[in-house]
Structure formats: C-alpha cells, structure tokens
Image: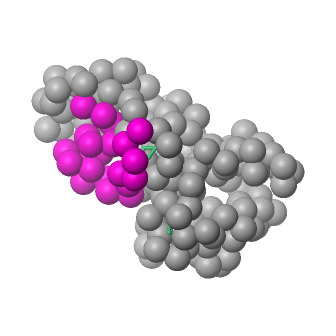
C-alpha cells in the first residue's frame, strides 16, 4: 500500500511501487490535468509540484513520494474559478491545443512561489524544460509575466501544513 499526499488529501493506493506518479494520478485518482507526452522526461507535459519544486511525474515512482507533498493543476482552481496563473493563461490566450498547458502552469507556479518578480531571462530559463509543440511559447511567457505583475501567487499554506483525509482506495 502506498500513501500519497496530493493537493492536501491523503490517498492510499494498492498499486505497484514502481508505478510512475503520472499513471497513479491519471489512472487511479482521476486527476487528469498532467498529461503523458513522452514518458521520458523530455517534454514537461506531466509536470507537477513535489515539495515546492516542479518535477516530471512520468519519471517518479510512487514509492519515492511517500511523506512528500504533491500538487497538481487541480489544486490551483476550477473551470468556474480559475486560479491567478490559470486566469493569466486565459487572458493571454496562451493555449492552442492545450496539451502542454497544465505542465506549463505548474512549472510557472513553482517559479512564482519562490520568485514573485522574475526577469524575462529567469522566466525563459525556468520554463525552457517544458516544450510546446504548437509554438505558443511567447504567449506562455507573457502569461507568466502577467501573473507576476498581478501578484498573489502563493503556496496553499493551510493545505500543505495539514493534509486532510481524502479518497482512500
Ligand atoms: S511525459 Fe513526462 S516529461 Fe514528457
Ligand atoms: S498549446 Fe499545444 S502543445 Fe502547447
């Protein structure tokens, strides 16, 4: 049994410890924002935040993630109430097909939580590990800058400090 803390809720999963986090999110927990792109740590479509750092969920076995704090795009907002960074991506029309966007937003979220006013160079350096096959990189960078200018990108303190009991499988 593997215990994972995701978006502030604890989940107990009876799965192979070698299962990549991405598969557990999508196949066992119905958290479908993170996408399978390459499965090789080369595209960033699967990016989530673990202990406040952006990581490739396709490369991380769930056995390495017990007692770690995992966040997915679902923690940032909803369709009806998008989070600040999600709204900035909407305002800048930063998506074409959208396949890369959840990973882009989570990588940008990790940046803005630690650096509220990144320079253009810092944004480009931080985001360069995530690829967009539609070529919307300039709009994505504009969205990150918009969110930074608006301010208010913070870690969900209460959620991270005190995980609540969630779905148990
Ligand atoms: S699917 Fe994980 S980096 Fe491409
Ligand atoms: S919007 Fe299509 S891959 Fe980025």
- Measuring 35% from the left and 51% from the top, which residue is drawn there? 36
Classify 39 as above or below 62. Answer: below
Q: Which quarter of the rendered picture does the N terminus lie within?
A: top left
In the rendered image, the vertical position of residue 28 relative to residue 33, given as above or below: above
Q: In this view, does 118 lie to the left or right of 16?
A: right
The quadrant of the rendering that contains the C terminus is top left
Q: Is residue 82 above or below residue 144?
A: below
Q: Is residue 152 left or right of residue 71?
A: right
* Residue under the image location 75 percent in, 51 percent down: 124
Q: Which residue range is magenta in the image?
A: 19-40
Q: Residue at x 44, y 64 (%)?
A: 99
Answer whether residue 164 is visible to the viewer in this image. no
Q: Which of 121 and 91 is in front in this view?
A: 121
Q: Position of residue 117 (x, y in %)?
A: 83, 51
Does the magenta run of residues contain 21?
Answer: yes
Residue 89: x, y in percent?
Answer: 61, 70
Q: Nearer the viewer, residue 29 or 17?
A: 17
Residue at the image point whose x is 58% and y is 34% from the top: 53
Percent position of residue 160, x then y: 49, 36
> Residue 72, relative to residue 13: is it above or below?
below
């Amino acid at each position: 049994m593997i215990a994972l803390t995701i978006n502030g809720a604890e989940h107990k999963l009876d799965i192979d410890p070698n299962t990549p986090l991405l598969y557990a999110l999508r196949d066992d927990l119905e958290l479908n924002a993170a996408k399978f792109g390459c499965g090789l740590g080369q595209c960033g479509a699967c990016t989530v935040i673990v202990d406040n750092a952006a990581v490739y969920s396709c490369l991380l076995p769930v056995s390495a993630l017990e007692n770690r704090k995992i966040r997915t795009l679902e923690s940032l907002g909803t369709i009806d109430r998008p989070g600040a960074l999600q709204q900035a991506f909407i305002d800048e029309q930063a998506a074409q097909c959208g396949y890369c966007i959840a990973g882009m937003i989570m990588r940008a979220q990790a940046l803005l939580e630690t650096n509220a006013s990144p320079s253009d160079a810092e944004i480009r350096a931080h985001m360069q590990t995530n690829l967009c096959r539609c070529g919307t990189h300039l709009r994505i960078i504009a969205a990150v800058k918009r969110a930074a200018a608006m301010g208010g990108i913070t870690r969900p303190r209460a959620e991270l400090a005190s995980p609540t009991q969630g779905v148990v499988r």
